[in-house]
Amino acid sequence: MGPSLGDLLEMPHLRLELRAGSGGAGKRVMWAQTSDLDKPWEWMTGGELLMKNGRTLPPNAPEQVALLEGLAANGISGLVLGVDPATPALDPAAIAAADSLPLPIVFAPYSVGFAAIGRAVADANAADEGRRLAVTERVYTMIRRSVTQPVSAGALKPLARDLACKLAVLDAESGDPVLHSPEAVPEALRQALLEEVRRRNGALPGVVHLAAGEMRAQVVEVPDEEPTVLLTYAHRASPPDLVLLQHIATAAAVLIAQQGIRREHERRVGAELLAHLLDHRLDADEAARQLSERGLPADDCVVVAARGGSETGEEHLHLSFDRRKINNLLLRRSGVLYALLPASDDALDVLTRRLGPGALIGVSDPLVSPLRAPAAAREANWAVRDAVNAPGRVSRYADATLLSVLRDTEEAQVVVDRVLGPLLRYDADHGTELTRTLDIFLTCDRSWQQASAATGVHRQTVVYRMRRVEEITGRTLSATAHLTELWLALRARDLLTAPG
């Protein structure tokens, strides 16, 4: 159980002096830890004896009282101050606060090192070391087994029993369980966790202490691609050892990685299904059946196309969707990431967050029928071109209304044939790139210098090519009406030629 503060005070070689908080002298000390941080409890689970350099004690009463209240609120057993000539006086208000909490304040003489106090606590806790080692061994046995066997639903239950508390591995943003737990986390505690994560903007210290009614909890971070935490909670004041919690957090990360193997298999199968849909390799009934099995009814889905963005974010995108229980199909093809997703803001928010601000994202009209997948992919690709100037670099095909003719592929083909037909035939017959150069020139806002850099040819070559475009199309690049026709015809061609 560990020694009490009173036991340490009775050890003559430590020469400790109790200055305040005598009502807490019976508190058990599980560990002795040094720290001069302003909020040391953020790296302690509770039950520790904090050893602090006396000269780092706040010099004024309000700060001294705040320190003591923070220690007591987070289950710290007592405060040892290593006094020296630079140690500030202990304010009467702080003494009164220590007595009322009660939180023992102990002075250690300058000649007694903190190492001696730590060794005394460790020696007194030697009887508990066997239990700690047994739990640690159980943790790593679970890790070894997870490599060769499927992760069981109650994998953490034996560890929770050993620690006499309850354990849960949760998504830090939603509070949803990441590993199955036989018992749901109390809602009040879950909400307290989410509020704390939001308050800290996701940057968690070594330990976060939570309280909900009589329930006390500790939170430590789990190393994973998605923000994940290990939550331990119980109706008691003595929390598990911090080192054990960190071992369990490591084990949880391994179990989550094992789940990731299953998710990766599902992602690959989903990519194959999306490829079949885009290539028209499934009949309507079979496609509808497979989409229904994956929880993606065509009526409620859209196709999203994304260019650019974070490669690492894209690599782990399926994990983010899985965490939030968002069904999806993902496929990378010809430099474009395609996603078949529910037509919801939540799904799009996950995708934009993961890909980052550098991504251009286009969203199709509702799929409606699986047979419309190729057309929806063209719509999404066309919307990507519009996303450069769209708010948040996300464009919806339904909102990108340049001309109604571009809303129908047959009428778009008419526009392309009428405006660009002669130019496209000339390029095909002579092996030139007049159409491509025109597109780049207009995209660069008719800047000769930028178009020259983008095409990799001399400025005068761009000038010559644009003259040939005017001659072949019968349209001048100085007339607004002609520019509009050429620009819209190029965008109509994008709609028709976009990879599906």
Image (cartoon, rainbow, N blue to C red):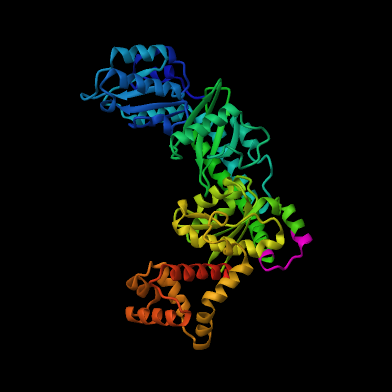
In this view, 486 is above or below 183: below
Q: Name the image quarter holding residue 199.
A: top left
Q: Is residue 455 magenta?
A: no
Nearer to us in this view, 370 or 254 = 370
Most extreme residue toward the right is 285
The picture places residue 275, in percent across and down from the top left corner, at 66, 65
Q: Name the image quarter holding residue 381.
A: bottom right
Nearer to us in this view, 137 or 366 = 366
Which quarter shows the C terminus?
bottom right
> Taking 386 as reference, is 19 left or right?
left
Residue range (magenta): 277-287
Residue placed at 58% from the left, 48% from the top? 347
The picture places residue 129, in percent across and down from the top left corner, at 52, 33
Q: Is residue 280 magenta?
A: yes
In this view, 103 is above or below 332: above
Residue placed at 25% from the left, 27% from the top? 55
Q: Is residue 307 visible?
A: no
Most extreme residue toward the bottom is 430
Q: Is residue 347 visible?
A: yes
Nearer to us in this view, 419 or 498 = 419
The picture places residue 384, in percent across and down from the top left corner, at 51, 61
Most extreme residue toward the left is 85
The picture places residue 152, in percent across and down from the top left corner, at 69, 44
> Taking 397 as reference, is 35 left or right?
left
Residue placed at 61% from the left, 39% from the top? 177
> Taking 294 as reference, is 126 left or right?
left
